[in-house]
Image (cartoon, coloured by chain):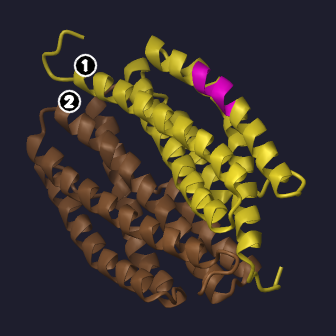
Chain colours: A brown, B yellow
Amino acid sequence: MGTTMSDPRALFLHELGDIFYAEQQIVKSLPKLIDEATDSELVEGFTRHLQETNRQVENLHRVFDELGETAKGEKCPGIEGLMKEHDQFMEEHQPSAMVRDTFLTGAAARVEHYEIAAYTGLIAMAIGMEETTAARLLSENLEQEKRALDAVVTVGERLAGDARPGSAA
Amino acid sequence: MGTTMSDPRALFLHELGDIFYAEQQIVKSLPKLIDEATDSELVEGFTRHLQETNRQVENLHRVFDELGETAKGEKCPGIEGLMKEHDQFMEEHQPSAMVRDTFLTGAAARVEHYEIAAYTGLIAMAIGMEETTAARLLSENLEQEKRALDAVVTVGERLAGDARPGSAA
């Protein structure tokens, strides 16, 4: 506290701790989302992403190792805000299954986007530091997040289409 | 509180209020980021985006009008968490100019990504509701956010490259 951060490596480790903490929170919260979702494609997507997220946490351990550092999470107000947004909506609005599924696609997309932002920045910094193994591991996580985002956006678009006035659904 | 939300239109209005609140917070916070940034391309990018954000708020007023509703913000823990993440880092780490600029590109990218997630969901819902004018206005905002994200990521990559060991910078 109060000391000046002037080393790019210190910023990298801070941001790495931030996404490490975020991924751990996501591992904890996905079972709740799996319970809340009713659309089968959404449930499957969340279930698959829980497995992926566990592997992403392992990748992050390896990135810390690569830098000769002990893995340490950095309490991350960003991801906590996104989770609070979900919890508060569910509590205040007790949405029907259809509204809930659509809401969950939006909440999950916000989380994926957060992670994409974090990994994109980390990869640029890892390349800048010539930490190529770290950059590769982080890129693996980034590509998975992008695919997870595409999947959840696709479900969101289908659900929004089903809500069309006069739609068969 | 406690009533069940079962109408897709109610969810759309909730999410519209969420991004309306977020955009207003961004208008308030960008002058702070402009002060904090030292890289001239970053300062210019934030300055341009402040003007764009003011127009985006106007577009959101028009979307509320299209739906025959009064514009009303919905307190949004997601954007508040992202802003807290920025404020907390700046206070705790008092970063040097170089670290600060790189940090700001990451913080701004997280905000742009949040907005991209929000607008993507809103556009799908607007199309589902056959609100084509609303969908078009929201798409204008989305395209601006994507360009703002690209700009800030480009600066972040340049700054990370400048940090390379043995780099001229």
Instruction: Locate residue A23, reporting x and y percent.
Output: 36, 65
Disc 1 packing (10 Å; few <14; some 14–19; many ≥20) = some
Q: Which label belongs to residue A153?
A: none
Q: Are marks 1 and 2 in contact (CB under 8 Å)?
A: yes
Q: Is residue B35 above or below residue A99?
A: above
The secondary element bearing badge 1 is classed as helix
Subunit of mark 2?
Answer: A
Residue A46 covered by magenta stretch: no
Say which mark, if any, is on residue B162: 1
Specify whether residue B86 is in view: yes
Residue B74 on image: x %, y %: 77, 58
Quarter of the picture containing the N terminus of chain B is bottom right
On residue A128, which mark appears?
2
Q: Residue at x 68, y 63 (%)?
A: B130
Front-lying residue, B154 or A153:
A153
Q: Quadrant of residue A123?
A: top left
Given the image, what chain letter belongs to the residue carrying mark 1? B
Nearer to the camera, A97 or A17: A97
Three-letter code for the amino acid on which mark 1 is drawn:
Asp
Number of callouts in the render?
2
Amino acid bearing label 2: Gly
Give the camera-side residue of A37 and B63: B63
- Taking B25 as reference, is B35 left or right? left
Q: Label 2 neighbourhood size at 10 Å, few (<14), some (14-19), many (20+)? A: many
Residue at image x 52%, y 55%? B117
Magenta-colored span: B47-53
Q: Which residue is pictured at 10% across the width and 41% down the height? A: A132
Q: Is residue B51 magenta?
A: yes
- Tell me which residue sits at (45%, 53%) in the image: A114
Residue B99 in sight in this render:
no
In x, y percent, where is residue A103? 60, 72
